[in-house]
Amino acid sequence: MAAEHCRTAWLRGRFLARGSLSLAGGRTHLEFVVAPEEAPILAARLEAVDLPASWRLRRGRGVVTWKSGEAVGLFLRRIGAAGALLELEARQVSRALRGELNRVLNAESANLQRAVAAAGRQLDAIAQLESDGRLQAQPYSVRLVADARRETPEATLAELAERTGLHRSAVQRALERMERLAELEPAPPEGSRSAMMGAHA
């Protein structure tokens, strides 16, 4: 216990005398700047207490470094630097929350773009089917969904389902049906077919 206490006290002293902690820009960086001959000794002592660190020479000085937030946090906890540890953990939580928020916002933006594109296709299909008379030949549920889509272009499938009183799956099938039909050429009227046959006769 005494040896462990002495090691912790020595590490605390080296940090206070030669250490620096940077949390700027969302990056965690802790380093000791020591005499060149001390750098490998300090790195070895840190590794002996399960805190392995890298070391190098920089402008004639030895530099022992951690860039892992987890390793830095463990070291601060070991030496009893509660204030610095709380600041580190607060920044890590904040960074994680920002990352999660950005992920959610990006996903929502992508979903919104897909929904807008789909609504645009559906409105074009409805307009085409109405112009050539095929919309009126569709089942009542399809015409009901078409009316709801035209009245509320921004509505989601769930909102269209609530508006029409249909199941969400039924709304989706109706919209897909109209898009498929719009891709097909309308059949010519009966009179036109007869006239065309007479012309070829």
Image (spheres, helix red, strand yellow):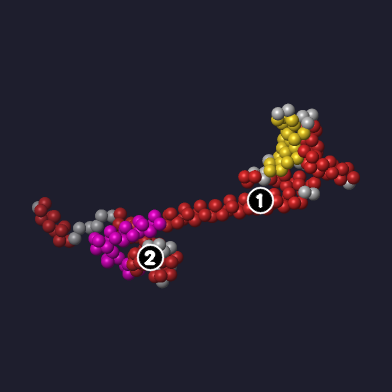
At x 77% / y 49%, what residue is drawn? Answer: 81
* Horizontal side of residue 161 vs 21, given as left or right: left
- Which amino acid lies under the numbered mark 1 shown in the image of this protein? Arg
Q: What type of secondary structure mainly makes up the magenta span?
A: helix
- Which numbered dot is residue 63? none
Quarter of image, res 17:
top right
Residue count near mark 1 (Cα–Cα under 10 Å), binned few <14, some 14–19, many ≥20: some
- In this picture, which residue range is highlighted in magenta? 116-143
Circle 2 — which element?
loop
Report the residue marked by disc 1: 91
* Horizontal side of residue 174 vs 57, given as left or right: left
Report x, y in % for residue 54.
Answer: 72, 35
Instruction: Out of 181 and 159, give the one closest to the viewer.
Output: 159
Report x, y in % for residue 87.
Answer: 70, 51
Q: Nearer the viewer, mark 2 or mark 1?
A: 1
Circle 1 — which element?
helix
Report the residue marked by disc 2: 152
* Horizontal side of residue 84 vs 182, given as left or right: right
93 within the magenta span: no
Q: CA distance from mark 2 to mark 1?
A: 44 Å
* Horizontal side of residue 23 vs 138, given as left or right: right
At x 79% / y 35%, what residue is drawn? Answer: 42
- Which amino acid lies under the numbered mark 2 shown in the image of this protein? Thr
| Residue occupying the far top of the picture | 60
N-terminal of the pair, mark 2 or mark 1, is 1
Instruction: Out of 117 and 176, give the one closest to the viewer.
Output: 117
Report x, y in % for residue 156.
Answer: 43, 63
Tags 2 and 1 touching, CB below 8 Å: no
State whether residue 53 appears in this view. no
